[in-house]
Image (cartoon, rainbow, N blue to C red):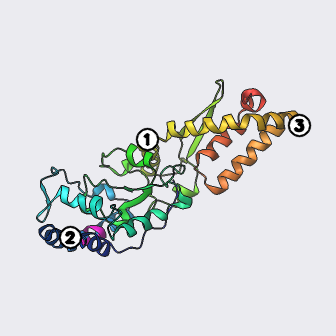
Amino acid sequence: MRAMIPPGEDSRVVYQTCINSIADDNLRNRLNALANDIGVSADDYQQRATAKRLYTIPPNDCGNNDIALGAVTKKELKGVYSSHMVAKTKPARAIYDLLLSRAPLGRCPFCGMGHASTLDHYLPKTKYPQLSVVPLNLVPSCKDCNTGKSTAVATIAGDQCLHPYFDQQNFIDEQWLFSEVIHTTPATVRFYVQAPDYWDDISKARVQAHFRDFKLASRYSIEAGNQIACLRDTLSRYKELLGVKGVRQHLTIEAQAAGQQHKNSWQTAMFQALAGSDWYCDSGFL
């Protein structure tokens, strides 16, 4: 995961910008009546996210055409986002684009590798329509993370995936993503999670949930496979010139460089595993 500075846009202003572009007077008036409720929901979201307790916000399980809040249906509330924030001709699209542009180096903060091309609702709008346009609930994301993540909601603290705006410190500064080399032809890498022993149980469970929810094991293995194929000629040359020691030194340098950038990137975990494998350094790359 990549840490991000939480957006500072006022949820009330964002909501008002969205609904001001609605031509239907009846719908606009009904949505206007919810402005204070949306603001209160946004404030509550921030407080619970800061306390790592977003799982305590109850989901709204009503049907799409049922009243979700005030005199507004769930479908209408979700439409504030899809029709009046995402739509390129609407004034609120500028806010959408601004939120998206803050992705670190254009990369998805959930997986750290995909191109951030959309906004993900951390709490899905199908369950939390009142949070559809709340900036703190909108995170730049790649399509794989956005569409691949389950719409199931966490009901206990340990089931919450990591939130780029609120989960930083140890989740960023300490390594919990690792990998091991599998003796196949060509070599492959298996990724896994191993949080530090001294972490609390909830933090350990959350990195596991993040790894599982975004299907990172298979996605990272595919990326590693492509990288390993590209390494073959380079490592063959190192072995010719410097032997197995030279191969290991090169991989160790790559691991250190990747780790300085991101301790929990798939590159860091992959290069560490490759450098630590006697089999790979001797002949596994051939």
Q: Are marks 3 and 2 in contact (CB under 8 Å)?
A: no
Between 140 and 85, the residue placed more toward the observer is 85
Q: CA distance from mark 3 to mark 1?
A: 42 Å
Please name the residue shown 66% across and 23% down the image: 185
Q: CA distance from mark 1 to mark 2?
A: 34 Å
Instruction: Return the residue found at the far right.
Output: 241
Compared to residue 235, the image places residue 257 above or below, namely below
Residue ID for mark 2: 37
- Residue 241's label in the rendered image is 3
Whole-percent x and y of residue 52? Answer: 38, 59
Between 3 and 79, the residue placed more toward the observer is 79
- Residue 212's label in the rendered image is 1
Q: Nearer the viewer, mark 3 or mark 1?
A: 3
Amino acid carrying mark 3 in the image: Leu
Mark 1 element type: helix
Between 9 and 30, the residue placed more toward the observer is 30
Question: For the stretch drawn in magenta, what is the main secondary structure?
Answer: helix
Please name the residue shown 31% across and 46% down the image: 151
- Residue 129 magenta: no
Magenta stretch bounds:
39-43
Q: CA distance from mark 3 to mark 2?
A: 68 Å
Say whether disc 1 or disc 2 marks the residue closer to the N-terminus: 2
Q: Quadrant of residue 46?
A: bottom left
Q: Quadrant of the C terminus?
A: top right
